[in-house]
């Protein structure tokens, strides 16, 4: 049997018993583990104050690994229990009792070595927590060795790349890298080998189905217990939605730029034509102000509808509301959602018609009425949008007195903007304006609405 001095020097808990299990020696490491000093020759089987099974149930001392070894006359390897100290602290340990025999082979006692499992338990708990975090992560987390062979693969990696763990583990990580990005892996491994972390960067990777996906990658070295670099951990985040948002923002900015330029074109045309047909700066300023306000009302409709467009009836009501009560206006026609360009140009046309009607036409007289009808017809295989503005109960108007910017808008500007034609007539009861244009230049398509 090892000498007492040697066993005292060992930093591991050691104690001995006689054939009946009475403790004959224990070192200081054992006393420290137990938090208790047993009585030599009296305490039996184990020096613990109390014992428990790993599930927390109380364990009798004659059930402990040392008792099993002596009672069953066999060595016990990796028997486990929990020592409860007098202060209530619980110490998990593994026991390795070995029988001691005399020269004739008879059992004279046993020696037991106890290993404190607290550090191992803490490490196990840390591994369990880390494993739970990795498996529940929404990001793909992959580990690989220094030869770029995949060694672990979480659920998010399967969702992102389409491979199951069985399909991925053991294969080179280059199966996820497009051919024209293979140089990235060599650079990553070279940096990992010298202990560098590769900060997040954006790139593309290859799914099992052959589809390319944009990802943000972060790669960190993995070290073993003595600090040697043995591999790398890679976190891949799917940034498809982020890239799609960027694409939509760029598209929106281009669309806004296009629409602003259209607005500028309309305003410039309005100013140019108004300047030709006004005699004083005051008149010019007043008419331009009114027409820009009318344009802004159409713009408000578009903004409120998130630029999807506006119906014909919404546009008519917005432009005529300042000039006439609803009772003096009648509208009839199917629901047609006008595209933004049509809203702006038809809005200017309706403003000119309403303004002129309030000054010189049906709306300038009590009882005068404005009737607006529209329909969609087919001609030569093409759908045609046809709208008629007709006034009743107004004074007789001489065509010569009606020449001005409004006439230009109704005959040329608005119709041409819609690739159509306009006809302005002067009946005895008031103005009749007829617009015909291909429906595709007037109506917002379902695809456009869905895209918005």
Image: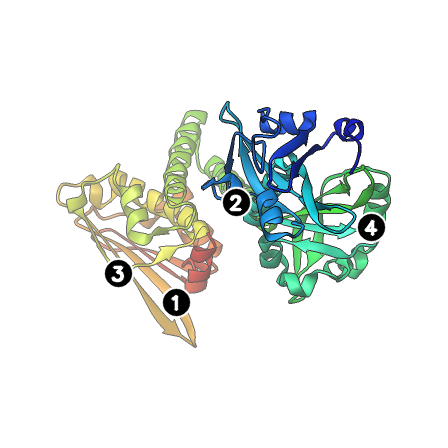
Residue bearing mark 3: 333
The mark that comes first in sequence, 1 or 2, is: 2
Q: Earlier in the sequence, mark 3 or mark 2?
A: 2
Q: Secondary structure at mark 3?
A: loop
Along the viewing direction, whichever of 7 and 224 lies nearer the viewer: 7
Residue at image x 38%, y 34%? 293
Colouring mode (rainbow / by chain / secondary structure / one colour): rainbow
Relative to 88, residue 146 above or below:
below
Which residue is nearer to you in this view: 371 or 54?
A: 54
Question: Distance from label 1 to label 4 (Cα)?
Answer: 69 Å
Query: In the rendered structure, which disc, 3 or 4, sits on the residue that comes first in sequence?
Result: 4
What separation in Å lies between label 3 and label 4 (alpha carbons)?
A: 73 Å
Identity of the residue drawn at 60% across and 24% down? 37
Which element is circle 4 on?
loop
Report whether residue 265 is seen.
no
Which residue lies under the disc numbered 1? 384
Mark 1: few, some, or many residues within 10 Å (few <14, many ≥20)?
A: many
Which is closer to the viewer, label 3 or label 4?
4
Mark found first going from the N terminus, 1 or 4? 4
Whether residue 283 is visible = yes
Label 1: state its secondary structure.
strand
Q: Report the Cα–Cα distance between label 3 and label 1.
A: 14 Å
**Which residue does the numbered mark 2 point to in the structure image?**
63
Picture quadrant where residue 405 is located: top left
Residue underneath mark 4: 146
Where does the N terminus fall, quadrant-wise? top right
Residue farthest to the left, as pictured: 367
Q: Position of residue 382 (x, y in %)?
A: 43, 72
Where residue 42 appears, as percent x and y from the top left, is: 57, 30
Q: Regarding mark 2 in the picture, which secondary structure is present there? A: helix
């Amino acid at each position: 049997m090892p000498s007492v001095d040697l066993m005292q020097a060992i930093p591991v808990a050691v104690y001995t018993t006689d054939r009946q299990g009475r403790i004959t020696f224990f070192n200081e490491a054992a006393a420290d583990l137990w938090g208790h000093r047993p009585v030599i020759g009296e305490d039996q089987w184990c020096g613990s104050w109390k014992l428990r099974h790993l599930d927390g149930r109380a364990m009798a001392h004659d059930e402990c690994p040392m008792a099993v070894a002596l009672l069953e006359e066999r060595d016990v390897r990796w028997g486990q229990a929990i020592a409860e100290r007098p202060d209530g602290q619980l110490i998990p340990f593994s026991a390795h009792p070995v029988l001691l025999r005399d020269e004739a082979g008879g059992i004279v006692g046993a020696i037991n070595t106890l290993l404190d499992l607290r550090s191992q338990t803490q490490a196990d708990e840390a591994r369990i927590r880390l494993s739970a975090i990795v498996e529940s992560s929404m990001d793909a987390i992959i580990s690989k060795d220094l030869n770029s062979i995949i060694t672990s693969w979480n659920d998010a990696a399967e969702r992102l790349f389409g491979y199951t763990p069985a399909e991925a583990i053991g294969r080179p990580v280059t199966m996820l890298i497009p051919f024209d990005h293979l140089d990235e892996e060599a650079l990553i491994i070279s940096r990992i080998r010298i202990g560098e972390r590769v900060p997040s960067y954006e790139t593309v990777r290859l799914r099992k189905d052959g589809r390319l996906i944009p990802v943000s990658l972060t790669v960190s070295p993995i070290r073993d217990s003595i600090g040697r670099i043995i591999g790398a951990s890679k976190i891949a985040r799917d940034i498809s939605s982020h890239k799609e948002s960027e694409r939509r923002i760029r598209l929106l900015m281009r669309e806004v730029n296009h629409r602003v330029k259209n607005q500028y074109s309309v305003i410039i045309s309005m100013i140019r034509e108004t300047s030709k047909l006004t005699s004083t700066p005051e008149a010019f300023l007043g008419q331009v102000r009114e027409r820009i306000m009318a344009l802004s009302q159409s713009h408000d409709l578009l903004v409120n509808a998130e630029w999807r467009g506006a119906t014909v009836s919404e546009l008519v009501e917005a432009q005529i509301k300042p000039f006439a009560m609803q009772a003096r206006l009648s509208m009839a026609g199917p629901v047609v959602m006008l595209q933004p360009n049509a809203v702006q140009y038809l809005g200017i046309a309706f403003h000119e018609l309403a303004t002129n009607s309030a000054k010189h036409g049906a709306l300038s007289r009590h009882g005068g009425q404005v009737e607006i009808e529209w329909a969609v017809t087919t001609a030569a295989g093409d759908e045609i949008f046809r709208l008629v503005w007709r006034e009743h109960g107004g004074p007789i108007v001489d065509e010569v007195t009606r020449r001005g910017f409004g006439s230009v808008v109704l005959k040329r500007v608005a119709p041409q903007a819609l690739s159509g034609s306009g006809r302005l007539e002067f009946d005895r009861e008031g103005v009749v304006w007829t617009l015909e244009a291909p429906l595709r230049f007037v109506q917002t398509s379902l695809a456009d609405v869905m895209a918005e």
